[in-house]
Amino acid sequence: MMTTYLPGFALGFSLILAIGAQNAFVLRQGLRGEHLFWVCLTCAASDAILISVGVAGFGSLARAFPKVEPIMRYGGAAFLFGYGALALRAAWRGSSGLNTNGRGQGGLAATLATALALTWLNPHVYLDTVVLIGAVSAQYDSRVMFAAGAISASFVFFFSLGYGARLIAPVFQRPQAWRVLDAGVGLTMWVIAVKLITM
């Protein structure tokens, strides 16, 4: 069973490792310490749902309806442009540095809505989880174990990224560090949005 679980874990981890809008958001929440557990759980659980759908064989269903792809692509790009603009505006205005009193500045509902949007409005998430992982899983006898490996990779990654961000929290006591992070997040969002439009 481990010969099926480990390839699933390795594939899932390698696909999610690339820095993207979702990862940048989790990193920022980890640095701020805002609703971190729920953000990590939301992102990992979303991946679990999508991976399960892909392994269950619905990757071919997405390919059967080609009109869905451009809707996802342009809708996701519009969202990323908007979110990127907010991050760049925050970088321009600057902030007061890392809030260390443990109280978040954003509501839980709004934070989770952003996490869900960054996940479910990103077409690359569907390509990686539903299509690619779903297709690769067909090569294994135990598709359930393959899916379990890929799903656990998402949980390990998001919780490590979110809670590991605290190790570099002292750096973000300085307002300038936040401006650099916000600028990086904003530019990352815009680069991904451009790629979605031009792909």
Image (spheres, rainbow, N blue to C red):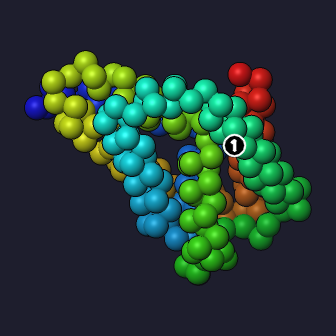
Q: Is residue 198 visible?
A: yes
Tell me the kind of residue under disc 1: Gly
Position of 50 compared to 8: left or right?
right
Q: Residue 51 appears at what percent x and percent y? A: 38, 40
**Up-down: is 168 above or below 125?**
below
**Quadrant location of the C terminus?**
top right
Name which quarter of the figure residue 53 lies in. Answer: top left
Residue lying at 51% horizontally and 36% vertically, measured from the top left: 126
Can you give x and y, in whole percent of width and height, for residue 54 in the image? 38, 35
Binning the other alpha carbons within 10 Å of mark 1 as few (below 14), some (14 to 19) or many (20 upward) gives: many
Callout 1: SS: helix
Q: Nearer the viewer, residue 179 or 7?
A: 7
Return the x and y of residue 103 as percentages of the image width and height.
Answer: 58, 81
Residue most toward the top?
139
For label 1, the residue is 76
Q: Quadrant of residue 86?
A: bottom right
Residue visible at 55% across and 79% down in the picture: 102
Q: Nearer the viewer, residue 34 or 50?
A: 50
48 and 29: which is toward the camera: 48
Total label count? 1
Residue visible at 77% across and 70% down in the picture? 96
Q: Is residue 153 visible?
A: no
In this rendering, position of residue 2 left or right of residue 198: left
191 vs 83: above or below: above
The percent coordinates of residue 50 (x first, y second) are 42, 43
Q: Quadrant of the N terminus?
A: top left
Q: Quadrant of residue 140?
A: top left
**Camera-nearest residue between 183 and 150:** 150
